[in-house]
Every structure is written in C-alpha cells, then in structure tokens.
Image (cartoon, rainbow, N blue to C red):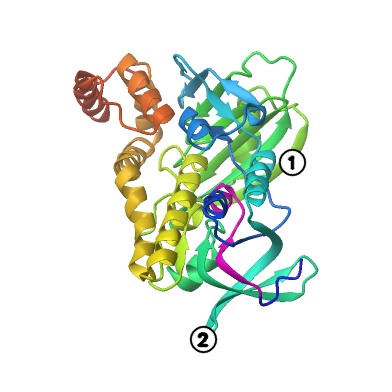
Amino acid sequence: MNTTQQTFDVVVVGGGPAGATAADVLAKAGKSVLLLDKAGRIKPCGGAIPPRLIRDFEIPDELICARIRAARMVSPTDKRVDMPVEGGYVGMVNREVFDEFLRERAARHGAVRQKGLYERISRDEAGTHVHFKDEGGAAREVVTKVVIGADGALSQVARQEVNKKGPPCVFAYHEIVEAPSSAASYDAARCDVVYNGKISPDFYGWVFPHGKTVSIGSGSAKKGFSLRKSVTDLRELSGLSGAKLVRGEGAPIPMKPLSRWDNGKDVVLAGDAAGVVAPASGEGIYYGMVGGEVAAQASLAFLETGKVASLKLARKKFMKAHGRVFWILGVMQYFWYANDKRRERFVAMCRDPDVQYLTWQAYMNKELARSRPASHVRIFFKDVAHLFGFGAT
C-alpha cells in the first residue's frame, strides 16, 4: 500500500503487544491508525501471560500453547522449591503467533498495517511527518497528529523525541528447543526459574514449556558475561542438552520505567520503549499491553482536547495502577539477586505458604493481595530474618 503523504490520526511505531494493543484501542474508537512494524523479528521471551491478561484483553484459548500449574525455584546449591498454582494456571504463548494475532485483530478493527523501518519525525505546518522505509527500501512518509513509540527497548522514537539514553536494561538470550518426549527433570506443566550466579550473576535463568517446544534462557546486565554459555550450561543442568535447537534469539529488556513518556508535543511511548518491564521477574507482555492501552487513551484525550498535557495521562495512569508493584520488585531484585548467598535464602523463603499465596495472587491478578493482612506482617519479619541470615536455608 502506498501511504506517501496519507494522513492518520495516530501512527503507532512498533507492532509488538504494546503497539498492536494501542492500535486496536484507537481503531475501535473510530480513529484512523497506521501500525508501522518491522517485519521478521521475534522477541526472545519466556511467553508467560497471567489470567488477568487473558480476561482483560480477550485472548482466545487456541493461542495458549501450554498451561503451567507450578513454578520450580532452583537455588545455587540446586535446592528445588515447587510453588503450585492453586485454582488456576499461567498461560504460555509463542510470541510469533501471539503478536501476529494482536496485529491482525487491530487490522480487523480498522488499523492500517504497514511493514517498514522507522527513520525519523519531522514537523511543518501540515502536521507531524513520520518518515520510514518500506519493505522494498523506498522512502515513505505519512502525516499524523500523534505518534505512539512502541518500538522496543532500543526505541528510536524514544531516543529522538523523549529520552536520549533510554531505560537501563538487562540483555536476554534464549534458545527454543524441541520439547523432549521424556526427561527426568522436565515437566511440561511447570516453569523452572534458576537463581544461580553461574547462570546469571544479577538476574535468573528459565526453562519455560511451550507445548511442542521449550524456551531456555538467561539474562544479565553484566558486561562480558556470556549468555550463550549460560544457556548451554542451563540446558545441561536441566537435562535438555540433547534437545534439538529450533532457533536462538537475543534482545535487551528494560528494567525501569522512564521518568517521562511524552515529548510535550505529539509523541507518547508504550511498552519496552517506556521501560515497562517488571523488575525481578522480567515480565513484560501484560505490562506492555497495559502500556499500549493507556498510551491509546492518552492519545484519544489529546485528539479530543488538543491539550498536549493529555499525553502525560499514559504514565500517570500506569504508575498509579502498577508503580508500587514495580518499586517492590525493584527493591527485591536489588537485595535478593546481589549474590548466591542471598539467592539461596530467597529460594528458601519460597517454601513459605504465605510467600507462595501472596506471590501467586499478585501475579495472577496484578494487584497486591489484601485479603490476608497478617500474611504481609509475617512475610515482613521472615524477609528481614532471611536478609540478615537468621532464616533457615
């Protein structure tokens, strides 16, 4: 489609969960939307989505490639703690299938899809111009009133228009392998989370079932740390060294929301571009989609009122709903991921029924559990005891 000099209400740069969700919300609201996406990229991702995401964003059952009934936490000394999911499951998705579904859903509701590579933004009396190259390498541009930058942790939109440095990141690498027909330490309904300095000095490693395949990965912000060797070691540790490799992928994952998401004129950020990946857990799909939703809502307010201050609503709404959880997870990562001695204590804490209950309630529903206030008090004292070495390991 030749989109040269076409005019749209909103141009969304990036077609991952955040960008596709933003485009869908805007299209359903009757706005003209261009969804500009670079073709052929699959983000490395464990692929876990909580029940609240499935409910809130109406994800069809056929996209769920595995249902996880437990998580296994593995300590540096190979102590293993199972955390069963009571009364539900965590859904797993394959990102290439999941992301394309979201893009196609936005298109069904009226968004115009365009494959291409974003280059820059310019402005004149006609409006805001988004410049990009199409699949054939031809230079194109469209005119718009608002740009939503949802082009990932290394977002060019963010760096050009909002924040030159971008958010601090952990670099992640994973390998997709064929699921084994049988393996002593592998369970197709369990996610393994490995806290071990050899697998990651400052994050964790994972083994996440995806039905016919498995995602085996690790992340770290430490320069010089070999993630490929880490994943090779993790495959060996998990009894999956002989599994057939399907593909390997790497990408940065932001670990802290940016302090500002808009440029005060015509650009607002969403998803990884805004830094909305949960610290400690690295969870990004749910928060990315919520980020896309609030960016779309802020854009709608701007289109209706003409007030650039409306663009600030995206960050304001997101942080009001999730800022406290992000702060708690950030503190948790800072303390418990510091070294293997603390990781050992952290995994030991996960045996506690109060910890398990509150962890799953917070994850599944994306809200801090308030129904058991006494549990919070008990966990506080247990947390302090473990931090100072008084807790059993």
Outermost residue, front side:
30
Q: Quadrant of the C terminus?
A: top left
From the top left corner, tell me how far across and down residue 295 is, in percent. Answer: 45, 56
The answer to whether residue 303 is left or right of residue 91 is: left
Residue at 78% from the left image edge and 30% from the top image edge: 244
Residue 260 appears in the picture as rendered: no
Q: Can residue 114 be found in the magenta stretch?
A: no
Range of residues picked out in magenta: 6-20
Name the image quarter holding residue 115. bottom right
Kind of residue sitting beneath label 2: Glu
Q: How many marks?
A: 2
Q: In the depicted view, which residue is nearer to us: 41 or 288?
A: 288
Whether residue 281 is situated above or below residue 276 in the rendered picture: above
Q: Earlier in the sequence, mark 2 or mark 1?
A: 2
The answer to whether residue 180 is left or right of residue 11 is: right
Q: Can residue 18 be found in the magenta stretch?
A: yes
Name the image quarter holding residue 156. bottom right
The answer to whether residue 315 is left or right of residue 146 is: left
Q: In the depicted view, which residue is nearer to us: 163 or 331?
A: 163
Whether residue 171 is situated above or below residue 390 in the rendered picture: below
Residue picked out by circle 2: 125
Residue at 19% from the left image edge and 19% from the top image edge: 374
Whether residue 46 is situated above or below residue 303 in the rendered picture: above
Residue picked out by circle 1: 247
Separation of residues labelled 2 and 1 (CA atoms): 47 Å
Residue density around tag 2, few if under 14, some if 14–19, many if 20 or more, within 10 Å = few
Residue at 26% from the left image edge and 21% from the top image edge: 371
Q: In the depicted view, which residue is nearer to us: 297 or 204?
A: 297
Residue 375 appears in the picture as rendered: yes
